[in-house]
Image: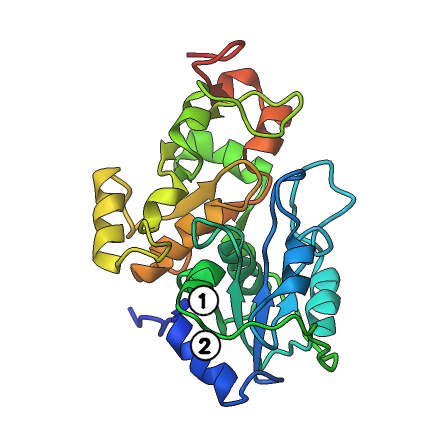
Amino acid sequence: MVHQVLYRALVSTKWLAESVRAGKVGPGLRVLDASWYSPGTREARKEYLERHVPGASFFDIEECRDKASPYEVMLPSEAGFADYVGSLGISNDTHVVVYDGDDLGSFYAPRVWWMFRVFGHRTVSVLNGGFRNWLKEGHPVTSEPSRPEPAIFKATLNRSLLKTYEQVLENLESKRFQLVDSRAQGRYLGTQPEPDAVGLDSGHIRGSVNMPFMNFLTEDGFEKSPEELRAMFEAKKVDLTKPLIATCRKGVTACHIALAAYLCGKPDVAIYDGSWFEWFHRAPPETWVSQGKGGKA
């Protein structure tokens, strides 16, 4: 078997700072601030306008999604994604670097990394350590909004990296894919509520394994080493040589599982985009497990 040469999924703050200093941010290198916070906590766009990596554009996850879907953060269409990232000056030849301002070091950035990949764009990286470490290390910031020249981006959906409700339902019987849930353990078990959720109990899809995404990051907000990540998958008896679907609440932190597996040399983890939010509202009750009220133990 010929192994695919993987594009670097992470770039360091030092590398990006040097690229900014050398004036490389432009058509060949675009930086995106993909921050998002729960309503009533922090205001991502306001914080971007106050300070961001020089040359970075704001990637608004609320704009770049399927607004017609009843579910939470579903992928936009190919044309919708192409138009949106094209407006940010990104072409198919651009190296895209994504970060966010979350205190953990990374939260939404892996989702945007996966979005580019699922739409056929290979040259995309996450800023290791995020904006938290960019600031901590004293790298430059600006309040100057980025106004890139629009570019043409052609999006081609890679269906192998995306799973639908019907495919996950079928997988309960066929068991062709391993299913890993990235939410905190209490939400997975159904003993803690889903945050900011009305009419959504916590719990998990039957047969899924729990690997909370926060555990992939160090206390300082950096991605753990491939050796550490491999050991984590092994401890959960997740076989990285076999097919894998990642899920969470709305298809965001599941992308941390895809990123961690990619860093271990596995680039083909699929995301169940609707995740628990869709599953809870659509799936037969016997297909989910919860230790909380109204759930099946």
Residue 141 position in % (x across, y down): 55, 72
Q: Residue at 39% of width from left, 39% of height from top?
A: 180
Q: What element carries label 1?
A: helix
Q: What residue type is labelled 1?
A: Trp
Q: Are marks 2 and 1 in contact (CB under 8 Å)?
A: yes
Residue 296 position in % (x across, y down): 46, 12
Q: Residues within 10 Å of mark 1 (few under 14, many from 20)?
A: many
Q: Residue at 37% of width from left, 48% of height from top?
A: 243
Is 102 placed left or right of 233 in the picture? right
Residue 121 position in % (x across, y down): 55, 70
- Choose mark 2 or mark 1, whichever is in front: 1
Q: Is residue 129 visible?
A: yes
Looking at the image, is mark 2 or mark 1 earlier in the sequence?
A: 2
Location of mark 1 (residue): 134
Q: Residues within 10 Å of mark 2 (few under 14, many from 20)?
A: many
Q: Is residue 100 above or below residue 173?
A: below
Q: Which amino acid does label 2 sit on?
A: Leu
Q: Residue at 54% of width from left, 9% of height from top?
A: 294
Viewer-closest of 13 and 198 = 13
How far is the residue under mark 2 from the one under mark 1? 9 Å
Q: Is mark 2 on a helix, strand or loop?
A: helix
Q: Quadrant of residue 278?
A: top right
Is 90 placed left or right of 257 in the picture? right
Location of mark 2 (residue): 16
Q: Check the picture and name the quadrant holding the N terminus.
A: bottom left
Q: Can residue 269 be seen in this view?
A: no
Furthest residue in direction top, as rendered:
294
Q: In this view, does 172 lie above or below 101?
A: above
Q: In this view, does 227 lie above or below 178?
A: below
Residue 81 position in % (x across, y down): 69, 62
